[in-house]
C-alpha cells in the first residue's frame, strides 16, 4: 500500500505537466500531497481487512461501499470526479459504468492479501464493480492487482508482461519517449494501464518506476499510484520512503497503514 500512496504524493505536484515531462524532479516539494487516490486506497484496504480474507464477493462489495463512503465523506475535497463524489454522498449508491482509472489506483491492497492470482483478481473485480462496473474499469483493477501479486511472488518481468498481454490485452509496446510525446491528460484505464506497465517494466527500483510514470505527464498522481503499487510488489519500498509516507498522511490513515503492515507481515 505504501507504493500506491507514495506514488500519489510524489506525482501530485506534477499533474497537468507542471515542470515538464522529465525524470529529474525532487521526490517531495511544497506541493506534494495525498489526493483522492490515497483516500480510496486506504478505504479499500480497510474494507478488505474488515471483510476478511474468506469473504464472499457480495461481502467485499458491501464492505467497500461502506468504507469508501465513510472515507470519502470524511475527506470530501481530495479531488474526486463529479460522478464519484455524488456516489459517495448517495443514500442508495449504485455503480455507474465508469472506465476511469480510479478503479486501478485504489486496488493495491488486493495484490497483497490473497494466496492465488485467481482470488486476487476476483477481489479486485469486486472492489471495482461498486462504481467502475464497465468492463474496462474492472479490467484495470484486475490487471493492477494481478501484477502486484505476480511481482511479489517472484514472476519475472517477461512473465508479467506475457500474462498481462494474454489476460488483459493491453498494448504497452510504445517506449516511454513515444508515450511522453503523445501523452495528454487522460484518466481512463485504457490509457493509464499501458503507461503504468511501461513505467514498471522499464524501472530499476521503486523510485525509478515512479519517476518513469510521473515523467509521462498528465494524470501524474494516478499514474504514480498505479505504477508505484506495481513497483512495490517487485522492489519493495525503502524504509526512509515509508517513514516519509507515514509522516505525510493523517493519523487515521496511518492507523490503517500500520494495521495492514501487521496483517501482511
Image: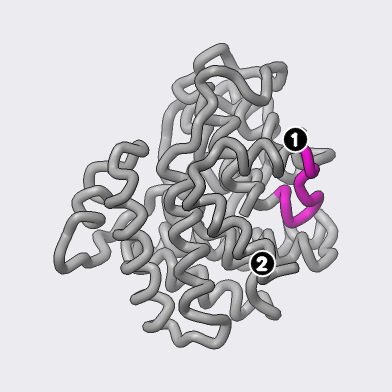
- Above/below status of 225 relative to 87: above
Q: Which mark is residue 26?
A: none
Instruction: Tell me the crowding category of disc 1: few under 14, some 14 to 19, or many 20 or more residues within 10 angstroms, Cα based.
Output: many
Residue 146: give x, y in percent of width and height: 64, 65
Q: Is residue 233 magenta?
A: yes
**10 Å crowding of disc 2: few (<14), some (14-19), many (20+):** many
Specify the label residue 112 is tagged with: 2
Image location (x, y in percent) of residue 236? 78, 51
Q: Residue at x 74, y 61 (%)?
A: 162
In the image shown, does 112 or 248 lie closer to the viewer? Answer: 248
User: Which region of the structure is painted magenta?
Assistant: 231-240
Main SS class of the magenta portion in the image: helix
Q: Residue at x 31, y 50 (%)?
A: 74
Alpha carbon distance from label 1 to label 2: 20 Å
The vertical placement of 24 against 258, above or below, is above
Count the labels in the image: 2
Q: Quadrant of residue 110?
A: bottom right
Q: Residue at x 67, y 60 (%)?
A: 147
Assign the C terminus to one quadrant of the image. Answer: bottom right
* Label 1 vs 2, first from the N-terminus: 2
Disc 1: which residue: 207
Q: Nearer the viewer, residue 165 or 77?
A: 77
Q: Position of residue 243 (x, y in %)?
A: 70, 41
Q: Secondary structure at mark 1?
A: helix
Give the side of residue 86 with respect to residue 117, left or right.
Answer: left
Residue 44: image x %, image y %? 46, 62
The residue positioned farthest toward the left in the image shown? 91
At horizontal 59% and vertical 19% (from top left) the residue drawn is: 29
Q: What is the quadrant of the N terminus in the image?
A: bottom right
Q: Is residue 100 visible?
A: yes
Magenta highlight on residue 246:
no
Amino acid at each position: 500500500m505504501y507504493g500506491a500512496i507514495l506514488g500519489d504524493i510524489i506525482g501530485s505536484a506534477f499533474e497537468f505537466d507542471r515542470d515538464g515531462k522529465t525524470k529529474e524532479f525532487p521526490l517531495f516539494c511544497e506541493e506534494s500531497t495525498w489526493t483522492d487516490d490515497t483516500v480510496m486506497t486506504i478505504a479499500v484496504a480497510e474494507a478488505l481487512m474488515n471483510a476478511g480474507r474468506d469473504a464472499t464477493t457480495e461481502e467485499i462489495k458491501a464492505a467497500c461501499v461502506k468504507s469508501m463512503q465513510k472515507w470519502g465523506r470524511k475527506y470530501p475535497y481530495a479531488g474526486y470526479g463529479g460522478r464519484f463524489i455524488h456516489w459517495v454522498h448517495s443514500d442508495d449508491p449504485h455503480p455507474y459504468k465508469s472506465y476511469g482509472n480510479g478503479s486501478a489506483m485504489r486496488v493495491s491492497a488486493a495484490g497483497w492479501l490473497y494466496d492465488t492470482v485467481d482470488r486476487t483478481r476476483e477481489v479486485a473485480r469486486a472492489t471495482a464493480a461498486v462504481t467502475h462496473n464497465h468492463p474496462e474499469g474492472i479490467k484495470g483493477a484486475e490487471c493492477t492487482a494481478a501484477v502486484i501479486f505476480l511481482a511479489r511472488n517472484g514472476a519475472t518481468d517477461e512473465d508479467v508482461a506475457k500474462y498481462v498481454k494474454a489476460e488483459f490485452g493491453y498494448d504497452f509496446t510504445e517506449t516511454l519517449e513515444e508515450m511522453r510525446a503523445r501523452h495528454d491528460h487522460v484518466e481512463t484505464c485504457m490509457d493509464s494501464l499501458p503507461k503504468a506497465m511501461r513505467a514498471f517494466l522499464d524501472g530499476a527500483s521503486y523510485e525509478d518506476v515512479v519517476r518513469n510514470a510521473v515523467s509521462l505527464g498528465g494524470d501524474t498522481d494516478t499514474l504514480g499510484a498505479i505504477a508505484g503499487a506495481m513497483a512495490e510488489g517487485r522492489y519493495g519500498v525503502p524504509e526512509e520512503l515509508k517513514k516519509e509516507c507515514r509522516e505525510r498522511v493523517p493519523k487515521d490513515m496511518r492507523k490503517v497503514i500500520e494495521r495492514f503492515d501487521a496483517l501482511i507481515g
